[in-house]
Image (cartoon, rainbow, N blue to C red):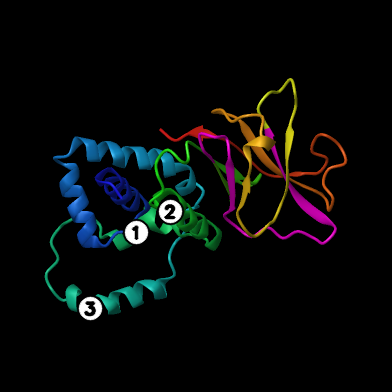
Amino acid sequence: MTERDDIDTLAGEYVLGVLSAEAIRAVEQRMATDAMFRGRIDYWQRRLHGLNALAAPVEPDPNLWLRIERTLAPAAAAPRAATKTPWWQSLGLWQATATLGVATSVVLAAILFLSPVPKSDWVYTAVLQSPDQTAGWLVQANAKNEVLLTPLTTTTVESDRALQFWTLADKAKGPVSLGLVPPDRPIRIPASKLPGVKPGQLFEITLEPSTGSPYNRPSGPILFKGNIVTNS
């Protein structure tokens, strides 16, 4: 990885809230003097905001606080200075892990976004959401218009049904089928199946008969949809 990759990884991990308390302090100290690093923090906040916003606030179980207090008992015995709220009491942290589905989404997104892949590989990203705003699938496209579709949650499909992947690049031409997709693993879609990829393009997954839609358009309900954006 290059130094730029290292900086991006650190910034992304800070925004996701997966760093240790010591690492968080080091990042915040660096932000005070490093304008470029602050810019990468801002970039990751904007890029990952959609996933964080999917988690509804929850009140942690009181028993959890007791376990935390027991774990931190030696430190708690020392006088406490009037400092910022510890990272483990951060509302953002609990929002990001409020439900198993959202937590899974965040972890998978972190792996995909922060893995040491050349920055030029994925130039577009979309999070496909259900009608109730649950993140279901991650769409990534590279400069060659190849698409990687990754499940962020479990979708149960009956034996006589299938998931079909669609895109809408031109309303005049209508939706284009990208084929049937497995509900439980990533799949790559070759560029030959796509009418190109551009910012704002719609991608969606519908529930269809086991052999796919009998028409050149979706025939079943839309389970997940989202518009792709440029990874700036």
Please give the residue where the numbered disc 1 appears in the rendered image. Answer: 18
User: Left of 218 or right of it: where is 22?
Assistant: left
Spatial CA distance of label 1 from label 3 is 22 Å
- Picture layout, residue 115 above or below residue 34: below
Quarter of the image where one finds residue 214 = top right
Per the image, is 180 magenta?
A: no
Q: For the residue marked with disc 1, what is the amino acid?
A: Val
Q: Position of residue 168 (x, y in %)?
A: 68, 30
Instruction: Tell me if mark 1 has few (under 14), some (14-19) or many (20+) residues whose alpha carbon lies within 10 angstroms of its own.
Output: some
- Quadrant in which the C terminus is drawn: top left
Which residues lie in the magenta part?
Answer: 141-167
Alpha-carbon span between mark 1 and mark 2: 10 Å
Element under label 3? helix
Q: Are marks 1 and 3 in contact (CB under 8 Å)?
A: no
For disc 2, the marked residue is 110
Compare marks 2 and 3 and give the one earlier in the sequence. Answer: 3
Pointer 3 local density, CA inside 10 Å: few below 14, some 14–19, many at least 20: few
Tag 2–tag 3 contact (CB < 8 Å): no
Dot 2 lies on which element?
Answer: helix
For residue 25, which quarter of the picture? bottom left
Query: How many numbered badges does the structure rendering display?
Result: 3
> What's the amino acid at mark 2?
Ala
- Look at 66% across and 34% down and name the residue there: 194
Check contact, mark 1 vs mark 2: CB within 8 A: yes
Q: Residue at x 64, y 37 (%)?
A: 203
SS class, disc 1: loop
What residue is disc 3 on?
A: 73
Left or right: 6 as drawn, with respect to 117: left
Residue type highlighted by circle 3 = Ala
